[in-house]
Image: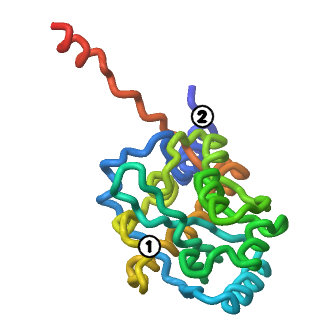
Amino acid sequence: MVTKSHFFANFASCKVEMMKKTIYNKFDKTQISALPRVLFEGRIITIMTEGETRKAVDYLLSQPILGIDTETRPAFKKGMNNKVSLLQVSTKDTCFLFRLNILGMTPAILQLLEDTKVPKIGLSLHDDIHQLMERAKFKPGKFIDIQKHVNEIGVEDLSLQKLYANLFGQRISKSQRLSNWESDILSERQKRYAATDAWACILLYEELVRLKTTGDYVLVKVPEPDTTIDNNIEQG
């Protein structure tokens, strides 16, 4: 027999469950295009001189957390590789774009990359650090790679676009990814794209920490596609 107290207890439990964030172990990429677009709306400051670099780095190292990413001019010929063109480092409201193809790796930039106090959050940081080291050797400081933490809440996706769609229900556009990052003047779209990627890393990391700490989520496991039918058709 279900008593009134049991009914209300079960109702309250279901209500709490409904209020939790629903996330997926794998997000359906085909659903991303229908999501509202997210864009960094803070200040974007392009850095092109050594003096500007020093001021920017001093400011960044005074912040509690940073998002970091890089861009490289695409190479469309086989065997051709370009060095990293842009280093973007963002706070929650200001993003600095260091034009490495013009600046090179200044002492201030190396100081930023070797800093061991301020956490620098990124995605697939092994690749970014490797590319940066092709410009100048340095000892990596306090870097945190989101890809190494998403599995702690059961998420298997590793791309920035899928992770952001999964955790925030918004779309990060990748339309500028293959643009010319060594252009004399970066377009507003390029700047906004680069800043968004770095800034989004902060939001993703903080949300991952929150979900892991509070357990305020429901993980939906997406079933693997059934290949049995396809195999039977091929065999037939």
Q: Quadrant of residue 193?
A: bottom left
Instruction: For marks 2 and 1, give the one nearer the viewer.
Output: 1
Looking at the rendered structure, the secondary structure element under dot 2 is: loop
Relative side of 186 to 2, left or right: left
Q: Give the distance between the C-alpha atoms of the residues marked 2 and 1, in whole angstroms.
A: 67 Å
Q: Which mark is residue 32?
A: none
At horizontal 43% and vertical 70% (from top left) the residue drawn is 38
Instruction: List the single residue furthest toward the left.
Output: 236
Q: Quadrant of residue 210?
A: bottom right
Relative side of 144 to 127, left or right: right
Relative vertical location of residue 1 with respect to residue 166 in this rendering, above or below: above
Q: Amino acid at mark 1?
A: Trp
Q: Quadrant of residue 219?
A: top right
Looking at the rendered structure, the secondary structure element under dot 1 is: loop
Q: Which residue is mark 2?
A: 3
* Residue 120 drawn at (x, y percent): 71, 65
Label 1 neighbourhood size at 10 Å, few (<14), some (14-19), many (20+)?
many
Q: Which mark is residue 181?
A: 1
At horizontal 40% and vertical 62% (from top left) the residue drawn is 74
* Residue 113 drawn at (x, y percent): 74, 67
